[in-house]
Amino acid sequence: MHTLPYDGLALASLDEQLLQPGIKGLPLTEALRQGAIGVQGWNILHADTSFPVAVLKTSALRHNLDWMRRFCARYGVTLAPHGKTTMSPQLFGAQLANGAWAITLANAHQIQVAHRFGVRRVLLANQLVAPSDVKAVLALLRGDPDFECIVLADSMTGVARLAEAVACQPLARPLPVLVELGLAGKRAGCRTLEAALTVARAIATAPGLTLAGFEGYEGLLVTEDRGADLAAVGAFLAHLVALVRTADDEGLFAGAEIVLTAGGSTYFDLVARGFQEVSGLSRPLRAVLRSGCYLTSDHGTYERMIGELNEREGESDGLRPALEVWSMVQSRPEPTLAILTMGKRDVSHDADLPRPLFYHRPGPGMPHALPAQSLIVKLNDQHAYLRLPDGHPLCSELAVGDLVACGISHPCTTFDKWRLLLGVDDDYHVRGVYNTLF
Amino acid sequence: MHTLPYDGLALASLDEQLLQPGIKGLPLTEALRQGAIGVQGWNILHADTSFPVAVLKTSALRHNLDWMRRFCARYGVTLAPHGKTTMSPQLFGAQLANGAWAITLANAHQIQVAHRFGVRRVLLANQLVAPSDVKAVLALLRGDPDFECIVLADSMTGVARLAEAVACQPLARPLPVLVELGLAGKRAGCRTLEAALTVARAIATAPGLTLAGFEGYEGLLVTEDRGADLAAVGAFLAHLVALVRTADDEGLFAGAEIVLTAGGSTYFDLVARGFQEVSGLSRPLRAVLRSGCYLTSDHGTYERMIGELNEREGESDGLRPALEVWSMVQSRPEPTLAILTMGKRDVSHDADLPRPLFYHRPGPGMPHALPAQSLIVKLNDQHAYLRLPDGHPLCSELAVGDLVACGISHPCTTFDKWRLLLGVDDDYHVRGVYNTLF
């Protein structure tokens, strides 16, 4: 196992892979070196690939990387984007090259993948509990003095388990731990400020551990009632800030800085504003946002949420959807029904069904927008049901072999359905590859 | 690319792989040859693996393979199990070694994977439309005279596209095509018998194609009203049989046998009975069932459906659930709430949420059943919310670090979330590996 420095959007070891026929989206009849994909001259609109195929529009990625770098600079906050969204080494590289301080991850195997591809700082936004997982992370830290990993704890049991593991596998430096503040009825995390402080004190005094700061996830507060959400997020952030102040007053922090982190992909503007106001601590505050979905956004949940964020921020050119799944019309059994060659295995279906965007008859020219009333009404494992508006000319025009592009809702559950996504320019020429390692 | 003969539950090329740390479920801190997994002495109940981990109980697989072989023999039907369920070469091998006549698949890349691992006959239960996909399948047929692939058509356009492709890449033998009969308002397939016969006649006269038979999928008729379903399935099967008779009377079949295929995992008994009665054709009938989920069944949809099938068949020892996902309690933030280290990325959530089965404190002994009112009430990408019955002793007993086993509903959407599943014996010793290639 060797690590490689990040070099932007390409990582040599992956590009050297010989890809065998049988990978979704790729039109292979014989093995092909991955690095050669971008020079095959494939174009989605010419149906050169297999279908379905997942594509990332590189201009939108570029825009979103720049947008988020500027946003963080404006508020003086740090980005540790959640890598579980994409689990793509090339995208981790692009995020780090565009100012990300760390990659946030969800579990030990994700950390192992990130480390293997050269990520040098990880924020594990979870408790580390399984003995084999603790051992795996400690092994990385022991084997690589340049590697940093910050973990969470939300209970005395969790602290005791970590301290015990570190005692068995001592580290050169103490393991930095954030206390997770939770929300009643929601996910993990201490339910009261007092409980969080008790855990913080235990970390501060545990041999081999050091209190790095506090963590919360305001994304659990998203409801249909935006006004109530904004108030609840404000209160939650105030609790996190209060915890930092109290712990600082008690002298529980020993490191060079204090980490305070929250921020999913819906309310990260509120987090940035909330954390911006904190000052007067004994050492510098590092306010960390963890949005994962900013990178690709989507055509569903996050498009709506980011539209609202744009309004709050007075932003006219916000994050853009970068991810599309293209499939082919496989059957036209009824005038208003087209069956597409994609299904639950290819697109997210947990937040919303995919949104049909364009259709195109393979060949020159650019795709046409589908009528607004077109809907994906159902997905099977390997099929989608596209319902066209009754009486629309497309009911007689759309044919077997035509291409249909869909936007998705919730990137995390589309990325994990693909071993690789193709990078395309605005004309849908295939320019490169993004691997995922789930 | 080379092919290997199947040898039961192990395929040499996969076992030779060097697995790097960072694969879900595996407790690796350094690379391990896959074939060595079964001799590591790992036991799920001792928390030797990483969590979550997906396990297949080999005794249940063995039982289900035997059960289905006997079932098919009793009704004189042939099995071409749907391989899209598992996409696992080892499981394809086990199915073929237990009497399967072919593997059914959903698209061209699945065919490429199956062919690479030695499957010699494939039933593609879909139209083949994308040029690159047609080319890929024809390339396999041209390159391997022992490989057979039967495809579907449901339109004159589809037939014309296939005939055109075969004209460009001639095959030594004509490409066998089944006409797909569909259902109004449902998925692909001809909507009337007359339309199906028109397509059949076109296939019979198209150069390079041969009419192999008829196909339908009665699984689309499953509703909440069982009585109505049984009648509708009966009528649909009668239509398929009528199509075969008419096409045979017209002399449209040219092969040595006639293929008639239907049968998902809910009503395959009705299909077997319905097809059993067909006789008096000009050549032998090959009645083919395509169930994919029989192999592992589940603890949800299919458990219920198979329970009903058992009643219809007078079966006292029917198909058994073989697939479990084990995770660890990561946080116990409230008396009735445990947060588990698994989420949407690890278990099916399209049919039902996972069903909590057992809990176990890592170490000796066997797991205990969870109280019946325990429920997984919510999944995030990487977390599950286990709600315990209020006031139950387990509310104070279940601790961070305890193991929880869940059954799943709909195996297809759990298999595709794992690169490999571990084979375990009844004591949860890890005995082997099942790769998936999605």
Image: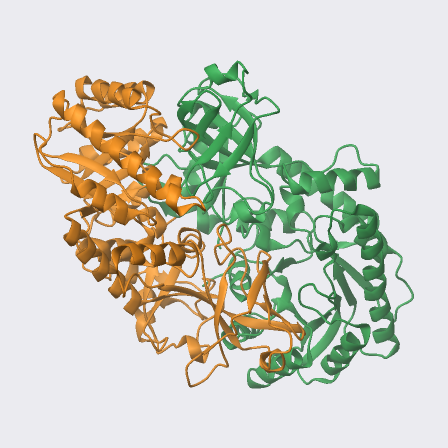
Chain colours: A green, B orange
Q: Position of residue B165 (x, y in %)?
A: 27, 22
User: On screen, A360 above or below A67?
Assistant: above
- Can residue B81 be seen in the rendering of this structure? no
Residue B394 picture location, percent across and down: 58, 79
When the figure is inspected, residue B5 is found, relative to residue A211, above or below; the finding is above
Of residue B204 and residue A58, the one placed in the foreground of this image is B204
**Is A263 on the left-hand or right-hand side of A228?**
left
Left or right of A201 in this view: B277: left
Position in image of residue A19 (x %, y %): 36, 44
Is residue A319 something that shows in the picture? yes
Q: Is residue A435 above or below residue B196?
A: below
Residue sitting at x 53%, y 63%: B342
Q: Is residue A251 left or right of residue B329?
A: right
Name the outermost residue toward the right.
Answer: A280
| A42 or A414, nearer to the observer | A414
Q: Quadrant of the N terminus of chain B?
A: top left
Q: Residue at x 22, y 27 (%)?
A: B243
Picture mark count: 0
- Locate residue B175: give its quadrant: top left
Observer-nearest of A231 and A136? A231
What percent of the width, then of the height, locates residue A426?
Answer: 58, 27
Side of A395 where A190 appears, left or right: right
Of all residues, the one furthest to the front in this rendering is: B227
What residue is shown at x 57% (from left), y 60% (from top)? Answer: B382
Residue B339, picture quadrant: bottom right
